[in-house]
Image (tube, helix red, strand yellow):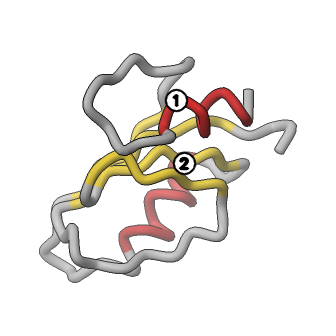
């Protein structure tokens, strides 16, 4: 994914199954890192349409590799594998 951008996604329906077809790594229940060539708007809407209408959602580009602690095993390895 040469033109891919890294996003952090959180939604308030942790039990919801979403399918993105992009490079995704779960950080915690309902929270993901997504490496995608989609625009912010296209990624946001692709996720939004898979969730119940009243579900909270945030999708944000990282602008670089994030720092994190206490996330799911393999998160840093996944991040580094696509850099």
Residue 46 horizontal side relative to residue 10, left or right = right
Q: Who's the residue at 21% across and 68% down the image?
A: 14
Residue 11: give x, y in percent of width and height: 25, 59
Q: Quadrant of the N terminus?
A: top right
Q: Which mark is residue 76?
A: 1
Q: Residue at x 59, y 33 (%)?
A: 77
Q: Is residue 18 above or below residue 24?
A: below
Query: Callout 2: few (<14), some (14-19), or many (20+) C-alpha neighbours within 10 Å?
Result: many
Distance of label 2 from label 1 (alpha carbons): 13 Å
Residue that lies at the very extreme toward the left in this rendered image: 54
In the picture, measured across the screen, residue 45 lies left or right of residue 6, that is left
Badges 2 and 1: C-beta atoms under 8 Å apart? no
> 42 or 29: which is nearer to us?
29
* Quarter of image, res 3: top right
Residue 64 x %, y %: 56, 18
Per the image, the residue denoted by label 2 is 34
Q: Earlier in the sequence, mark 2 or mark 1?
A: 2
Instruction: State the residue in front, 78 or 38.
Output: 78
**In the rendering, which numbered label is found on residue 33?**
none
> Residue 10 appears at what percent x and percent y?
29, 51
Q: Residue furthest front?
A: 73
Question: Relative to residue 47, is residue 60 depicted above or below?
Answer: above
């Amino acid at each position: 994914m040469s033109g891919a951008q890294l996003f952090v996604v959180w939604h308030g329906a942790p039990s919801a199954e979403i399918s993105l077809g992009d490079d995704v790594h779960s950080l915690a229940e309902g929270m993901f890192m997504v490496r995608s060539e989609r625009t912010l708007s296209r990624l946001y809407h692709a996720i939004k349409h898979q969730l119940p209408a009243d579900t909270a959602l945030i999708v944000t580009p990282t602008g670089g590799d994030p720092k994190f602690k206490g996330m799911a095993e393999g998160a840093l390895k996944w991040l580094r594998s696509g850099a």
